[in-house]
Image: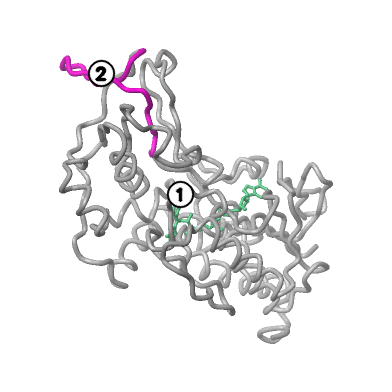
C-alpha cells in the first residue's frame, strides 16, 4: 500500500474519503483497517440513552450529509447506520475486524502494519484509532479493597441496574454530568471532581471553539499530552443540566482520598457508602500499537506539526488532540490526505483525481 489508515471512525473515514479524492486508489493504493466487527467507530458502543439530541452534535462526514433523524434515536444506532452507508456509497476499502497490534519501520524505509490477520506494508500511516478503547482510571488508595462495582462509561449500559443503590460518580466532564443526571433519577448519587466545574451558560460559538482548539494545538506542538478539547471548553448548561441542578444532584465534592471496602472516604473524616464507583475520568489516545515507532518525546507526549508527527511526515495522527471532535476529525482527514499526496506524489496536479 501507499497508505494504511488505522481506524474507521469519523477521522479514519474522513481520511479515506480525502485519500480517494487526492488520487490514491481505494484497495490498491490505500486501505482502512478497523478493529470493530461493523461500521460505526466508537459510536456503536455509546450507552443506549445517549440520543442524538444529547450529543454535542455529530458533524456530517465529508461529501454525504447525515440523513435527518429523530432527536430521540440512540446515537449508537443512527451514527453506525450512517457510517455504514457512507462506506458503501464511496466504496471505501475498509477491512474488519482487523485490529492492528504494532506498526514498525522496515529496513527499506517503509512501515509494517502488523495484525492478527496478516501484515501490510505502506509508505505512510494515518492513525485514526480514537480514545474509546482506552478509558482512563486514576489510581487511588484502597481501590482493590472496594467490594462494590467499579466501572467506566465504556461499561455503562443504563441507569436501571443502579436502582435503589448508592453510586459515586468521579469526573468533571460531559460524560460524568450526563450519567450523573440519569443515575440520580433512580439511585443516590455523590459527585466528586478534582476541580470545581466551569459551567458555560451560553451555547458554544465558533470563536470559543477555535480558541479551545488552539489551546490543544499549542500543547501537541510543544510535545505535551493533548488533554481533551472538551477539557478546555467547560461544561455546557443544557436543559438536562438545569433539571439535574434543580434536584441538587450537581452539588460536587472534592475527590475522596481513598476507597474503603464499603465506599469512599476523605482524610477529614467524612465518608460515603457506595455500591458502585463510576470513573468518568476521561480517555487517553489509543496509540499503543505505535510504540515501536518511538514517537514519544522525553515529556511523554508526541510533538506534532499539523496532523503529522514532527520530523515524521509519513505518520499522521487524525482525531488526536486538537482534532478529537467530529468536526476536527473531518478537517484532519483532509489535511492528512493532502499532505500525503504532496509528499508521495509531489509532481502530480491537485488532486490526482476528483
Ligand atoms: C461519550 C462521548 C460522546 C461524544 N460526543 C461527541 C459529540 O457529540 N460530538 C463530537 O464532535 N464529538 C464527540 N465525542 C468525541 C468523539 O470521540 C469524536 O468526536 C469522534 O467521534 C472520534 O472519532 P475517531 O474517528 O477519532 O474515533 P473512534 O470513533 O473511536 O474510531 C476509532 C476506530 O479505530 C478503531 N481502532 C482502535 N484501535 C485500533 C487498532 N489498534 N487497530 C484497528 N482499529 C482500531 C476502533 O475500533 C474504532 O472503530 C464524544 C466522545 C465520547 C467519549
Q: Position of residue 137 (x, y in %)?
A: 43, 32
Counting from the top left corner in percent of width and height, residue 151 is at 45, 32
| Disc 1 CB within 8 Å of nearest ligand 1 atom | no
Of the 4 image quadrants, the one containing the N terminus is: bottom right
What secondary structure is found at the residue carrying circle 2? strand
Closer to the camera, 3 or 140?
140
Task: Give above or below for 30 relative to 324.
Answer: below
What is the number of the mark on residue 21?
none
Q: Does the residue labelled 2 lie within 8 Å of ligand 1?
A: no
Instruction: Identify the element where label 1 is drawn.
Output: loop
Residue sitting at 43 percent across and 46 percent down?
A: 225
Give the residue pinned by disc 2.
Answer: 265
- Check residue 41 for magenta coloring: no
- The residue wearing badge 1 is 223
Which residue range is magenta in the image? 261-280
| Residue 171 falls in image quadrant | top left
Q: Which residue is drawn at 27% across and 33% down?
A: 189
Q: Which residue is drawn at 22% across and 18% down?
A: 271
| Residue in the foreground of this view, choosing between 268 and 3 | 268
Mark 2 or 1, nearer chain start:
1
Q: Is residue 270 left or right of residue 174?
A: left
Amino acid at each position: 500500500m501507499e497508505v494504511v489508515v488505522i481506524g474507521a471512525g469519523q477521522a479514519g473515514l474522513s481520511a479515506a474519503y480525502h485519500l480517494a479524492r487526492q488520487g490514491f486508489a481505494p484497495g490498491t493504493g490505500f486501505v482502512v483497517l478497523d478493529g470493530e466487527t461493523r461500521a460505526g467507530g466508537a459510536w456503536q458502543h455509546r450507552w443506549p440513552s445517549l440520543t442524538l439530541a444529547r450529543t454535542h452534535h455529530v458533524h456530517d462526514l465529508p461529501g454525504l450529509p447525515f440523513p435527518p433523524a429523530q432527536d430521540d434515536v440512540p446515537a449508537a444506532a443512527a451514527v453506525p447506520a450512517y457510517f455504514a452507508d457512507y462506506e458503501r456509497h464511496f466504496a471505501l476499502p475498509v477491512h474488519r475486524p482487523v485490529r492492528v497490534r504494532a506498526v514498525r519501520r522496515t529496513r527499506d524505509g517503509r512501515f509494517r502494519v502488523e495484525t492478527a490477520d496478516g501484515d501490510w506494508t505502506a509508505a505512510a500511516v494515518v492513525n485514526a484509532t480514537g480514545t474509546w478503547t482506552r478509558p482512563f482510571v486514576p489510581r487511588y488508595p484502597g481501590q482493590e479493597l472496594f467490594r462494590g462495582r467499579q466501572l467506566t462509561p465504556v461499561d455503562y449500559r443504563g441507569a436501571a441496574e443502579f436502582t435503589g443503590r448508592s453510586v459515586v460518580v468521579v469526573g468533571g466532564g460531559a460524560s460524568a454530568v450526563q450519567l450523573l443526571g440519569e443515575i440520580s433519577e433512580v439511585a443516590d448519587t455523590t459527585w466528586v471532581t478534582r476541580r470545581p466545574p466551569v459551567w458555560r451558560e451560553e451555547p458554544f460559538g465558533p470563536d470559543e471553539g477555535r480558541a479551545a482548539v488552539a489551546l490543544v494545538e499549542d500543547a501537541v506542538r510543544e510535545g505535551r499530552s493533548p488533554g481533551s478539547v472538551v477539557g478546555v471548553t467547560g461544561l455546557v448548561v443544557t436543559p438536562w443540566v438545569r433539571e439535574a441542578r434543580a434536584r441538587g444532584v450537581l452539588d460536587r465534592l472534592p475527590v475522596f482520598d481513598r476507597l474503603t471496602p464499603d465506599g469512599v472516604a476523605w482524610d477529614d473524616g467524612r465518608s460515603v457508602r457506595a455500591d458502585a464507583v463510576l470513573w468518568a475520568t476521561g480517555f487517553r489516545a489509543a496509540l499503543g500499537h505505535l510504540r515501536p515507532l518511538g514517537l514519544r518525546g522525553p515529556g511523554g507526549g508526541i510533538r506534532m506539526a499539523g496532523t503529522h508527527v514532527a520530523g515524521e511526515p509519513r505518520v499522521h495522527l487524525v482525531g488526536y488532540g486538537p482534532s478529537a471532535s467530529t468536526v476536527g476529525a473531518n478537517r484532519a482527514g483532509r489535511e492528512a490526505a493532502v499532505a500525503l499526496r504532496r509528499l508521495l506524489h509531489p509532481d502530480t496536479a491537485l488532486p490526482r483525481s476528483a
